[in-house]
Image (cartoon, rainbow, N blue to C red):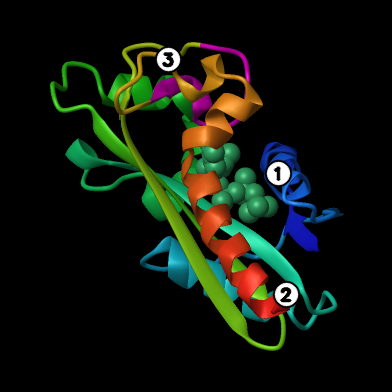
Amino acid sequence: MKVVTSNLGKYAEYKEILERAGIRLELIHMSYPEEQLESIEEVAEHSAYYLKGVVETDFFIDDSGLFIDSLGGFPGVYSSYVNKTIGNSGIIDLMKGKRDRRAEFRTCIAYYDVTLHLFTGKTRGSISEESKGKNGFGFDPIFVPDGLTATYAEMTLEEKDSISHRSKATVAFLEFLKKKAI
Ligand code: ITT
């Protein structure tokens, strides 16, 4: 199986989950154009159709985003830009004084074989008061999943995989691959 991504943090998480399920993962380490569309599903679909002309078939991509309730879902589909520009400290500043800190992480996997298949995963949580933890990548130091007190960045890869938005999308993807193989 091939994954196309510029993000080695994502690759590490997929490698862990897929190889545990007996699927060897190959990295195509490249970035690709991402349209600023309404939802991560639309972005993933658009990017996968672009990549099918570039990469041989049987690949998947992952479009993810952090959606903060009190900011109307921001940064959402703008997550990559926001991460590169204001970063986690910028989000913490935007959230200063806000009582409602609820947020959701979403991942959409777009898998292209002869046609396109989408699988989504969501994990609810909240934005921490400060950045905590050194593991993971991106917004991991500021996201605390519901029912826990640690941020994603304070967890091991296995702990994050047991509850993350990405692992939920991957479980649905694996179910599909299992049925496809029958
Ligand atoms: P691609 O090449 O796969 O597109 P990307 O880093 O641009 O890599 P996205 O657009 O899907 O990926 O991600 C939007 C932003 O959200 C980006 O800054 C990521 O670092 C961040 N992000 C995605 N998944 C995350 C996760 O599980 N934990 C923390 N941050 C995450």
- Circle 3 or circle 2, nearest the eye: 3
State the mark number for residue 51.
2
Q: What element does badge 1 sit on?
A: loop
Write down the region rendered in magenta. Answer: 133-144
**Callout 1: 10 Å neighbours few (<14), some, many (20+)?**
some
Q: Position of residue 122 (x, y in %)?
A: 39, 49
Q: Look at the numbered disc 1 and say if its residue's Cβ is closer than 8 Å to ligand 1.
A: yes
Q: Amino acid at mark 3?
A: Ala
Picture disc at residue 33: none
Which class describes the residues within 10 Å of circle 3: few (<14), some (14-19), or many (20+)? some
State the residue at coordinates (50%, 51%): 64
Q: Find out whether residue 169 is within the magenta segment.
A: no
Which residue in the structure is indicated by mark 3?
150
Q: CA distance from mark 3 to mark 2?
A: 36 Å
Rendering coords of residue 48 (x, y %):
64, 74
Foreground residue, 71 or 166? 166
- Tell me the residue at 66%/70% (across/down): 177
Q: Position of residue 27 (x, y in %)?
A: 84, 53
Quick one: 105 or 49, which is closer to the camera?
105
Which mark is drawn over residue 7? 1
Mark nearer the N terminus (2 vs 1): 1
